Image (spheres, grey):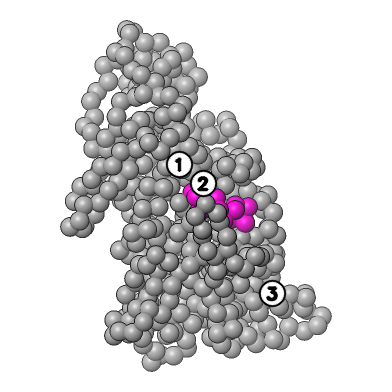
Amino acid sequence: MQKVYHSKRPHRKSRAGCRSCKTRKVKCDEGRPSCRACTLRRDNCVYLSSPTSTPTPSSSAVSTSKSFARLTLSSSARQSAAPEQQIHPLFRPVDRDDFDMRLLSTYTSLSYRCLTTHPNGLTQVDHVLKVKIVEHAFSNPFLMNCLLSFTATHINRVGHENMAIPSSRAIYYRARAFESYRRAIEAANPSTFPALVACSLVLCAVSSEMFRDEDAKPLYILDWLVVWRGIGLLVGMTTHKSLFESGLRVLFMRPPIDLDAAAMHVPNNLLFMVMSIADDDADASDVAVYYDTLRYLGSLYQELYNNGFNSVLDLRIVTFFTFLPARFIELARAKRPRALTIIAHHLVFAKLVPRIWWMQGISDPQIQNICHLLGGEWDSVLRVPTAALELTDLGEIAKLLFDDPAWEPPSSFVALEGTDGLALKSITGGDPIMTTSWVQNDGTEIDFVPLPGTFAYRPAATKIGDDDIEPSLLTDVLPSYSPAQVDGMAVDAAYDCIL
């Protein structure tokens, strides 16, 4: 077993590096029989002298959750009077270097918070993000790759006083995350499904960086919504029992939706857009699909109108794509004007969650590209998304959405954490008005009863995930890299890394 890793241990210069690393004047990780740099370069790794005894990690150590220790976070990591517990590995996996482990430490102390919509965190969700996901990551490399890519992107986007990520390293992490995720989906090993579901959630944030890529597709949003639907695909492949046993269940709670009530909040111009579809229109056979999708969109208007700006609204906005019918995704990817118009209106709501860094800067370019593609014929129905391009103030955006200059948000709400999810309670009193739970794609909650030694739930036929979306669609929308390309990125990253 290798030496214990501590996130804040001072760097000591290596005196026993290999000849190749010394010649190139780069840091050697002293791996045996070949260090990481020589392995990546396919060079012969020759040491000048015998190193001190360095035990190698056993396979059992890598795979067991007992190989974790609890360490107290520093006060600078969290602004809290109460000490927090954090998971760090007592070993370093053979395919990970010191930089990887520092990055993982940053994830467990900082970056994990960016995967929740609640500004102050929630005990259950925080524990899963900091502890359970990391435990799964050490036995599922595709999840570890995704966590490292997410953290590297986070650091480069918002900055970190003690760490910088070279662009070559960030690109390498992203490529490795995409490729390992793709291979895991293609392998379809049931034992990895819970980790794959968690990975699909993190990958939504990782893939958002493609919006900012110089070579990004003008309507990358159409690929991104497929990545979001990957969550439903993988949940549909995973048994409820295995998700419970994995400890990851709380990550996939969503606010329930009363679709009939939500329909009452759909803007009239969007309803007319669908009501006016003629029998000879290309969308004539998909009228029901558009109505269903508008009801999901209506739930955003309903939440904002009734409860104002709150964590549940943020969660509804972020998880909107996970509810969409599979047929609507086909219509959107075919660039049907009505489907793109609905997406443009959702992008206006996406401007209301500026706290989530990986959602920042997405809406305006995509709205502009949708408007440019559809042209003047659709200007009237795109009036709100077009006007939103000029706005950044949340209140002004809300007034635009409601077409009401006098609109004011209702009384403020505070988030309460309970055993069954997140609830909102008005500061003026009264009972909690909203919870999060396991929700089917029709917006209704799943009525389940976990029993000792068994797993039962009602009703018998529940649908959280999707069985009508092909896994190949999910992998097709991800950038593809050959093994040689990934190896080349690894070499660049190894030498550009800032320690």
- For image coordinates 36% across by 53% down, the residue present is 127
- Which of the 4 image quadrants contains residue 383? bottom right
Question: What separation in Å lies between label 3 and label 1 (alpha carbons)?
Answer: 38 Å
Pinpoint residue 487: horizontal percent, then vertical percent. Answer: 52, 30
Look at the picture and state if 27 lies above or below 175: above
Q: Is residue 113 left or right of residue 328?
A: left
Disc 1 packing (10 Å; few <14; some 14–19; many ≥20): many
Q: Label 3: which residue?
A: 289
**Magenta segment, which residues?**
235-246
Question: Hey, what amino acid is under mark 3?
Answer: Val
Nearest the eye: 291 or 312: 312
Along the line of sight, the residue nearer the viewer: 191 or 137: 191
Residue assigned mark 2:
195
Q: According to the image, label 1 marks what residue?
A: 137
> For residue 242: magenta?
yes
Q: Is residue 338 shown above or below 158?
A: below
Compared across the picture, whether 26 is left or right of 339 comes to left
- In three-dimensional space, the C-alpha distance between marks 2 and 1, rounded to whole angstroms, equals 7 Å
